[in-house]
Each structure stands twice: as structure tokens, then as C-alpha cells.
Image (tube, grey):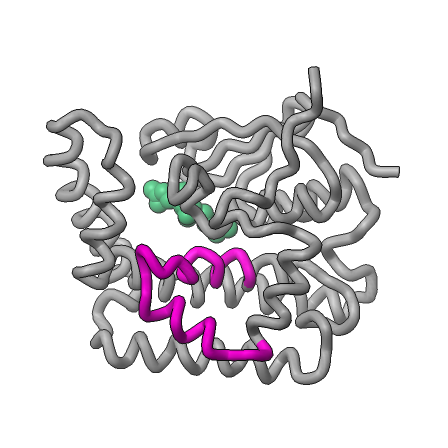
Amino acid sequence: MVDTRLNDLVLIQYGGWVRGATMSPPCGKIHMALRFKGLRCRVQNVHSPFQARRASPRGRVPVLIVGGRVVEDSAEILAALDALQPDPPLLPPAPELRARARVIEDWADEVLYFLAVWFRYGHEENFRRVVRKLFERSPWFVKLLGPVLVRRMMRRRLSCQGTGDKQATAIESEFCSALDAIQSLLGEQAFLLGARLSSADLAVAALLDQVDLPEVTPWPAARIQERALLMAWRGRVRALCGNAAAGDALLPPAAA
Ligand SMILES: N[C@@H](CCC(=O)N[C@@H](CS)C(=O)NCC(=O)O)C(=O)O
């Protein structure tokens, strides 16, 4: 029997994105985890690092409040959700599989993440599509200043991390190699670690969902969609966890 302790869980996230979904890969990962476990949660949207700082000194989201305790970083949040409701598990119990899950999750969070950030903010045409979406309902002065600030902040981040200093062709080829690597890891398996879904699948799928948005990032979306094995795996993940980038991962709130 699924536990649904509404009000025990509050997710602070970047929201208000395409079709009202979250625009952040690690926030999407949490939506998917909550759905997988059948947990309900209240969601609070923030729209800038300044607002995020009210919930977390780092100014980063997701932040999950679990029974009054503040948990930061999506990997820590998945562990907290497993502790709250162990069944079904996100982290495999066997130490070797757990280690593999951790390594794949870190790769998704730190390598795939910056490729996705580049496709949104480093690629000029996509950047224009992103800021049009981001600020479509903002007052005129935010529409004017917002894109300048977002461009400066995100390109500085990309440059400090290294991806921002690469040529577009190198980033595109890195992305294709990453997709091929995921297909090789899958092989004949249903999920990245075997027959059962784990945190590794959530981390990778949440990331790919955020660039499989043809209206915003058409090039990576097409590269994902042309890979049959990847699409079949993603279908299995979505059947269990929904698609946070399209706004259908979180369970609807319980009736009052
Ligand atoms: N590794 C962290 C990443 C958190 C993160 O960087 N979140 C982004 C949103 S996708 C953020 O809050 N950015 C605001 C900023 O960098 O100021 C996690 O998985 O939780």
C-alpha cells in the first residue's frame, strides 16, 4: 500500500516552464521519484536564485522539505525519499549496484547536465527560444533585462565549468557519444542497472527529457528520437515515473 503523506513533503523548484512543467533536470528527477514511489507533495515554484536562496543558502534547487527537515541536492533527496518510503527502492540494496547507480547519477548530474545547459543557454537560437518562454508573462522591463542577466550568468557558469569554452561541433559530438554510451550500457537490459529501475535511470531520463523539447532544443531532441533503444528504455521509465519536462510526472494532489 502506497503511503501518501500530503503536507509532509514540499518541493521547491524552478517551475512555470513548457506546459507548466519544471524547467530544471534535477527538479524533474525528484518529480519522477515521487511518482515512482506514489508519494504526493506540495510544490513551490521559484523564479530566480534570489528566491531559491530563501529555501537554501546555496540558492540552488531542488530543495525538499521532509517533515520540516531541509534536504538539498537531488541525489541527497532521492536517498531521503528512500529512507522515508523504502518500497519501491531507488537505490539498489546490493553495494556493487549501488556504486554503479551513484557513478551514473553523478555523470548525469555533472556531465550531461552541462551539455543540456549549453543546448539551452550557450546555443544562440535556442537561447532566444528559451528566454521567450521564460519571460513570456513578465512585465516589459523584466522582458528587457531578464535575458541579459540570464545570458551573463549562464554563460559564465558554462565557461567556468569548461563546456562553454568548447566549439559547438565538439559539444554536439560529445552529446551523441553520451547517447551512444547510454545505449551501450543498456544493451539488452530493461533499465541501466538491469531488470529494475533505479536512481541511475531517473538521473539520465530527467536530463534527456529536458532537451527532448523540439520547440526549444530541436537538435538534441532529434538525436534522442532517432535512437530506438534509447526511446524504448525512455518509454519504460515514463510508464513508471511520467515525464517531468512535460508536466505529467507528479501525482495530482490528494482530494482535500
Ligand atoms: N547537482 C545539483 C544541481 C542543482 C542546480 O544546480 N540546480 C539549478 C537548477 S537546474 C539551480 O538551482 N541553479 C540556480 C543557480 O545556479 O543559481 C542537484 O542535482 O541538485
Quarter of the figure with residue 198: bottom right
Count of residue discs: 0
Relative to 201, is 18 on the left or the right?
Answer: left
Q: Is residue 58 visible?
A: no
In the rendered image, the residue lying farthest to the right is: 1
Is 209 magenta? The answer is yes
Q: Position of residue 210 (x, y in %)?
A: 43, 56
Relative to 140, is 84 on the left or the right?
Answer: right
Q: Position of residue 157 (x, y in %)?
A: 27, 54
Q: Is residue 11 visible?
A: yes
Relative to 220, is 109 on the left or the right?
Answer: right
Q: Position of residue 247 (x, y in %)?
A: 51, 43
Q: Nearer the viewer, residue 111 or 211?
A: 211
Quarter of the figure with residue 131: top left
Residue at horizontal 56%, vertical 74%? 230
Looking at the figure, which quarter contains the C terminus? top right
Q: Is residue 189 above or below residue 65?
A: below
Residue at horizontal 18%, vertical 25%? 139
Quarter of the figure with residue 205: bottom right
Residue at horizontal 78%, vertical 70%? 195
Residue at horizontal 66%, vertical 84%? 187
- Please tell me whether the stretch drawn in magenta is mainly helix, strand or loop: helix
Looking at the figure, which quarter contains the N terminus? top right
Is 121 magenta? The answer is no
Relative to 161, is 60 on the left or the right?
Answer: right
- The magenta segment: 205-229
Q: Nearer the viewer, residue 114 or 253?
A: 253
